[in-house]
Image (cartoon, helix red, strand yellow):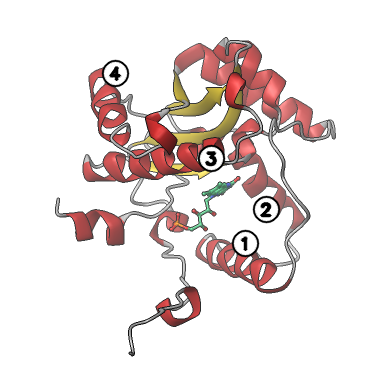
Amino acid sequence: MQFDEVILGRRSIRGYKPDPVPRELIEEIIGLAMRAPSSMNTQPWSFYVITGEPLEKIRAGNTERMLAGVPQSREFRTGEAFTGQHRDRQIGVAKQLFSAMDIARDDKEARQDWVMRGFRQFDAPVCVIITYDRVLDGSDDTPFDCGAVATALVNAAWSRGLGTVINSQGIMQSPVVREHAGIAEDQVIMKSIALGWPDESFPANSVVSTRKSIADASVFVGFDG
Ligand SMILES: Cc1cc2nc3c(=O)[nH]c(=O)nc-3n(C[C@H](O)[C@H](O)[C@H](O)COP(=O)(O)O)c2cc1C
């Protein structure tokens, strides 16, 4: 696949075929992703690649705790709830997804089912947890570097026909993930990526999210002089 095809074709995948993903292919994707730049080439990231029974235990633990109302326990700062244009964009993509899935605004049960899918990692056969070295805690460069490698990973996966969705839902109950993935104490849990072969018949997989315009996003300085 050409670069533009990957970048323009990739979208978040929230419905997967149950087929397993070969370990060698995931290693190849991680190898490509790790060509991402990082601050001073620190490469602060690690990847816990989880499938099978440990992943089932994480799905079950996340579900149980979310349904029981256990408050989320992410290991990084989350800031305030979105407002203004950010909230509008959050609602915008949610509307696109609910429309594709034919979930009505007042259908609380269907909405709840949809949210619970996220806590189950969208039933993907593989989940990749990105962590970073705790010794770097406090530097905003480090989460930035994790974002860079995560973006590279989802694009590398797409170039090999695999779908992904970067998500926070999978790590909202970090103790569950830490226990079943055996995450070392010197690692901070940053983000979760569900990974697998896209189920083409799953309606939400066809949603193409919008982007603000280049003019809204960019300030060009010194070009007109
Ligand atoms: C940091 C981060 C957290 C995200 N968390 C979730 C999540 O918890 N659940 C979900 O369904 N999608 C999640 N997403 C996916 C975004 O909703 C998605 O990337 C965005 O709407 C743009 O759509 P696209 O990936 O299809 O281009 C997350 C993405 C990022 C980068």
- Asked whether residue 198 is in view, the answer is no
Q: Residue at x 75, y 26 (%)?
A: 64
Q: Given the image, on which type of amino acid does mark 4 rest?
A: Arg
* Residue holding disc 2: 110
Dot 2: element: helix
Q: Characterize the local packing of mark 1: few (<14), some (14-19) or many (20 or more) Cα atoms within 10 angstroms.
A: some
* Residue holding disc 1: 103
Point out the residue furthest to the front here: 225
Mark 4 and mark 3: span between their CA atoms?
30 Å
Which is closer to the viewer, label 2 or label 4? 4
Q: Point out residue 27 in the picture as x, y percentages from the top left corner.
A: 28, 22
Q: In the rendered structure, which disc, 2 or 4, sits on the residue that comes first in sequence?
A: 4
Q: Given the image, on which type of amino acid does mark 2 rest?
A: Ala
Q: Characterize the local packing of mark 2: few (<14), some (14-19) or many (20 or more) Cα atoms within 10 angstroms.
A: some
Disc number for residue 156: none
In the rendered structure, are the residues bearing label 2 and label 1 in contact, judged by CB atoms less than 8 Å apart? yes
Q: Given the image, on which type of amino acid does mark 3 rest?
A: Asp
Mark 3 and mark 2: span between their CA atoms?
39 Å
